[in-house]
Image (cartoon, grey):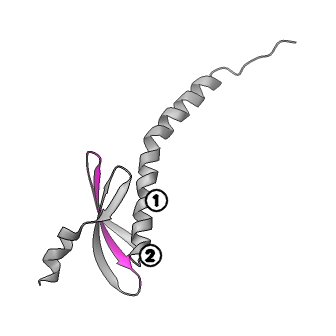
Amino acid sequence: MIRRRKAGSANWFAAAFYLASFISPVNASDVELRKLLNLQGCTSFSLTETRVSGETTLHKVNCYGSTHRKVDVVCKARICRLDESANDGESTR
């Protein structure tokens, strides 16, 4: 009995693995962004602007929960944090 291997199946697997290695960091930062917003009481949110510079991403977010507020979140690689400096200027108005 001769076993036949599907043509190109190894190539498809390698291509899928290669593609997944680029997509994974984006998904990881999305998870971190959602966790951070959930901890801030954002039951739902909308991204109003996203800027990318190298590994750093700035998200401007409308946060909806018990109140509506705008927050800035900075994600670098797989870690996200609130951008406190962006909110300092608004609190003095």
> Disc 2 marks which amino acid?
Ser
* Image position of 13 (left or right of 81): right
Depicted 6 relative to depicted 63: above or below = above
Instruction: Check residue 60 for magenta coloring.
Output: yes
Quarter occupied by the N terminus: top right
Please give the name of the residue rendered at 53% of the width and 34% of the height, measured from the top-left corner: 17
Residue 78, given in percent of the width and then of the height, sits at 38, 52
Residue 80, given in percent of the width and then of the height, sits at 35, 60
Residue 44, which numbered label?
2
Q: Which residue is mark 1?
A: 31
Nearest the eye: 41 or 53: 41
Q: Rounded to the nearest whole Å, what is the CA distance between mark 1 and mark 2?
A: 14 Å
Q: Quadrant of residue 2?
A: top right
Please give the name of the residue rendered at 66% of the width and 20% of the height, measured from the top-left corner: 7
> Disc 1 marks which amino acid?
Val
Which residues lie in the magenta part? 50-65
Depicted 19 relative to depicted 59: above or below = above
Dot 1 alpha-carbon crowd within 10 angstroms: few under 14, some 14 to 19, many 20 or more: some
